[in-house]
């Protein structure tokens, strides 16, 4: 517990003002482009039902376990991700440090996609034309326009984070999350009742076991971390603004459940429509931007629904991007002793610049490739995505499980959790966090880097 610098008081760091506010902020962090944009296209690329099945199994094993792990570390230490780990055990701050780096890299390209969403709010009104695919490609490959939207998204994120915990992040999330849920339900209803939707439903709901390959498992694992905001100290940071009497066992059940519900619903909103309109399910990142405008065109008051929908996607994205930014900003405030405003401005500027590269890699810079340890080379956008989702986040999750199991010790974590919770799942959680989760994530990580191939032959 030794600290060389005095700890900031809790008032100065900020706190959630209510349980509902915290929950909405945490769900707001989890629910975002990961659910609405990434999940449907990953399912479309990885065998539909096969992906959904593996995803759900992994969420059940990892989601609750790691969510509770991160929240307990955060609430115990009231620190930023780096400080939290090093406060419990000197020398372990690097786990949080990795996370901060991951969050930094994620937000750099996340904000580019956030910009696309803003563009689609505008385009819903001005019109997208007949060829939805060409419209999307033209837009994201152009050199200037997407960067302007990226700047707008980044700037809005910064404005909210500058206002702090309860005044900014919590206030925004409380309004947005319930609205998103209702709107999504309306679009699901429209999509599943389209003529020809049943082929999509079948694709989405019937797992073909032959299609559960290593690639599908790796994709699903990365997506679990990404979608639940796990593996980079995001929930450590959000947990650090919690009161001691909060029941984090319940929160750790509720957040992954709601997040997965929204992801599954997004699949219902998009995949049936893909089949009904004869699009390719495996087209990748354009899926949401290409299919949904076609759905809206075919419904009464389509323009109205289209605007509302993209506005809500935008809110979901921004309630996630603020959590990504908060991790870095909290580090600036707690460790570097910067003011909140300085911290936000400095990190925003750097992330904006990296994001420019990510955006250009869709077009002008598409020939610039970065080699990676898996033997492939990636453009900047894909590089940021691959390195964070498939390597840094699982590694962060693995280290946080090892940290609790063997460094902090399960009994200490249990003591922390029990302060505000009956902790009925203590026995099973203890086994999961100490053995099951580390072994499972370790094996998948090894196979991701290609080492497993080499070891098994
Ligand atoms: N979970 C968010 C989404 O699905 C993205 C996100 C926010 C995130 N905070 C994170 C991903 C922390 C990984 C780690 O859009």
Image: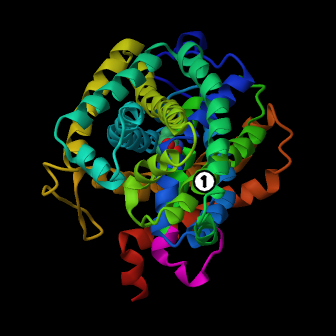
Is residue 161 something that shows in the picture?
yes
The N terminus: image quadrant: top right
Secondary element at tag 1: helix
Residue 95 drawn above or below residue 77: below
On the image, which quarter does residue 445 sit in?
Answer: bottom left
Picture layout, residue 152 above or below residue 230: above
Q: How is the image coloured?
A: rainbow
Report the side of 390 relative to 354 (left or right): right
The residue closer to the viewer here, 399 or 280, is 280
Instruction: Give the x, y percent position of residue 134.
Output: 28, 53
The residue identified by callout 1 is 191
Q: Is residue 131 above or below residue 441?
A: above
Asked whether 350 or 422 is in front, the reply is: 350
Q: Give the tally of numbered discs.
A: 1
Residue 364 appears left or right of 421: left
- Where residue 240 appears, as percent x and y from the top left, is 60, 27
Between residues 22 and 115, which one lies in front from this camera angle?
115
Task: Tell me the quadrant of the picture where the C terminus can be found.
Answer: bottom left
Q: Residue at x 57, y 47 (%)?
A: 228
Q: What secondary structure is the stretch in magenta mostly built from?
A: helix
**Visible residue check, residue 397:** no
Segment colored magenta: 205-217
Q: In the picture provided, is 257 more to the left or to the right than 225?
A: right
Taking depth in this image into account, of 306 and 211 the one nearest to the observer is 306
Q: Residue furthest front?
A: 300
Task: Tell me residue 416's x, y (percent).
Answer: 73, 36
Residue shown at 45% from the left, 67% from the top: 45
């Amino acid at each position: 517990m030794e600290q060389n610098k005095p700890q900031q008081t809790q008032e100065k760091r900020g706190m959630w003002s209510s349980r509902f506010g915290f929950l909405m902020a945490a769900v707001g962090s989890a629910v975002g482009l990961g659910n609405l944009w990434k999940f449907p296209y990953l399912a479309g690329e990885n065998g539909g039902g096969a992906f959904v099945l593996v995803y759900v199994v992994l969420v059940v094993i990892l989601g609750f376990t790691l969510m509770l792990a991160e929240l307990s570390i955060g609430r115990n230490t009231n620190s930023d991700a780096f400080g939290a780990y090093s406060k419990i055990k000197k020398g372990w701050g690097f786990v949080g440090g990795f996370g901060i780096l991951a969050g930094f890299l994620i937000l750099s390209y996340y904000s580019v996609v956030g910009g696309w969403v803003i563009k689609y709010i505008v385009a819903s009104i001005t019109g997208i034309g007949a060829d939805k695919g060409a419209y999307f490609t033209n837009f994201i490959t152009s050199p200037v326009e997407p960067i302007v939207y990226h700047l707008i998204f980044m700037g809005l994120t910064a404005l909210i984070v500058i206002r702090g915990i309860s005044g900014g992040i919590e206030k925004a999330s409380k309004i947005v999350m319930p609205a998103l849920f209702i709107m999504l339900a309306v679009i699901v209803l429209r999509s599943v009742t389209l003529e020809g939707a049943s082929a999509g439903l079948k694709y989405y709901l019937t797992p073909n076991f032959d299609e559960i390959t290593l690639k599908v498992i790796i994709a699903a694992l990365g997506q679990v971390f990404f979608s639940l905001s796990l593996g980079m100290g995001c929930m450590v940071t959000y947990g650090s603004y919690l009161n001691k009497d909060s029941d984090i066992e319940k929160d750790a059940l509720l957040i992954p459940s709601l997040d997965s519900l929204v992801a599954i619903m997004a699949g219902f909103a998009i995949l049936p429509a893909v089949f009904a309109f004869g699009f390719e399910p495996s087209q990748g990142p354009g899926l949401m931007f290409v299919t949904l405008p076609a759905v809206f065109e075919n419904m009464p008051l389509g323009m109205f629904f289209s605007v509302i929908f993209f506005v809500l996607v935008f809110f979901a994205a921004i309630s996630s991007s603020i959590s990504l930014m908060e991790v870095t900003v909290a580090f600036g405030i707690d460790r570097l002793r910067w003011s909140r405003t300085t911290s936000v401005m400095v990190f925003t500027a750097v992330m904006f610049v990296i994001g420019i590269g990510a955006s250009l890699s869709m077009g002008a810079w598409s020939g610039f490739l970065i080699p990676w340890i898996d033997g492939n080379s990636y453009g900047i956008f894909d590089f940021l995505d691959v390195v964070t989702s498939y390597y840094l986040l699982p590694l962060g999750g693995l280290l946080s499980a090892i940290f609790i199991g063997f460094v902090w010790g399960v009994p200490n974590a249990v003591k922390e959790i029990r302060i505000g919770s009956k902790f009925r799942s203590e026995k099973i959680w203890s086994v999961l966090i100490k053995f099951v989760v580390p072994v499972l994530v370790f094996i998948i990580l090894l196979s991701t880097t290609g080492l497993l191939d080499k070891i098994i032959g």
